[in-house]
Structure formats: structure tokens, C-alpha cells
Amino acid sequence: MFDILVYLYETYYRPEACPEPAALARKLSAVGFDDFEICEAIDWLTGLTEMAGEELADVVASTGTRYYVDEEYNELGSAAIGFIQFLESAKLLTPLQREIVIERALAVDESPVTLSKLKIIVLMMMWSQNKEPDALIFDDLFGSDDEQIPRQLH
């Protein structure tokens, strides 16, 4: 599924350029993607669109600290949560965007979510909102996951 998401990001500059689900499925199949992965990716993208369209006034107005329940912590893992907190503390994610990323990460059938997949989720969330990642986030999204360089938040 994540290969398809990256393909969509690279192929369609804006989400509006992306065809409707039925046409998209045909195009992805013609490119050589597996039907199961295509269905999984389209379902995931549909969820992303629905989540972005929901009214989340409480989240938008949030200025407090986000606490993760045990299920979220177990599903996401400490690396993913740390990365989300880093992006939010660096003002690269709003509270609403954070919640969209968390919800879409929880929708992935993987526990814990790998950091590389979480980065794709962040990238797709920004893509769906027609936002270009700035240089700092772009480097973080495509930097090596193997580097264990501690982050400084100041």
C-alpha cells in the first residue's frame, strides 16, 4: 500500500489531479500494482479525505498536551509518537494535522507503525491538504531512519 501512496505523491502533484477511485484503480492496475494493495490504498485515501473533512473544532482550538492512551501507544510505538511530537513542537504539524496523522497511522494494519511508514503518512496528509512540506520537514521525511542522531528541539 505504501508503494502506491508514494507513487500517487510522485505522479499527481495535487490531489485534485488524482482520478476518481474506479479510474485510479484501473490506472494503478495497469502500472502493475496488486489488486489487494490497490483496494487497501484507496480505502486508506478515502479515510484520509473523510478525516480531513470532519469538524474537529476541539482539536483546532487545542493548546494543551496530547496524551496517548495505551492502545495508541502500543499501535504507534515510541518512535512514531516521538516523531509526531517533534513535528508538532517544531510547528510543522498543527493539532488537527497531528490527529489526522494519528488516525491514519492507526488505520494501518501494522503494529507498531515503522518510522518510514509514518513519514509517508505525514507526507500524504500534507499532500491531501495541498501543502508543500518545508525544507526541514522534507529532510526529516526522506532522511535515513538508520541514523540515530538525537533531535534537539531548540
Image (cartoon, rainbow, N blue to C red):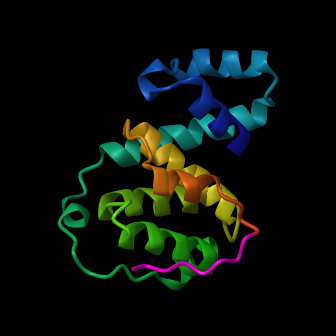
Q: How many marks?
A: 0
> Relative to residue 3, is residue 17 depicted above or below?
above
Most common secondary structure along the magenta stretch: loop
Name the image quarter holding residue 5.
top right
Q: Residue at the location (42% across, 56% down)?
A: 100
Look at the image and tell me whether residue 27 can be seen.
yes
Which residue is at 57% across, 34% downward? 9
Decide whether residue 150 is among the magenta residues. yes
Note whether 9 is above or below 22 in the view shown: below
**Quadrant in which the N terminus appears:** top right
Residue 74 as seen in the image, left or right of residue 88: right
Which of these two is toward me, 96 or 36? 96
Q: Residue at x 51, y 19 (%)?
A: 20
Q: Which residues are magenta?
A: 147-154
Q: Is residue 135 left or right of residue 24?
A: left
- Residue 26 position, x and y percent, is 68, 16
- For residue 36, what is the image quadrant? top right
Residue 34 in the magenta stretch? The answer is no
Q: Position of residue 105 (x, y in %)?
A: 56, 60
- For the C terminus, the image quarter is bottom left
Q: Position of residue 7 (x, y in %)?
A: 66, 32
Horizontal relation, residue 131 to residue 105: left or right: left
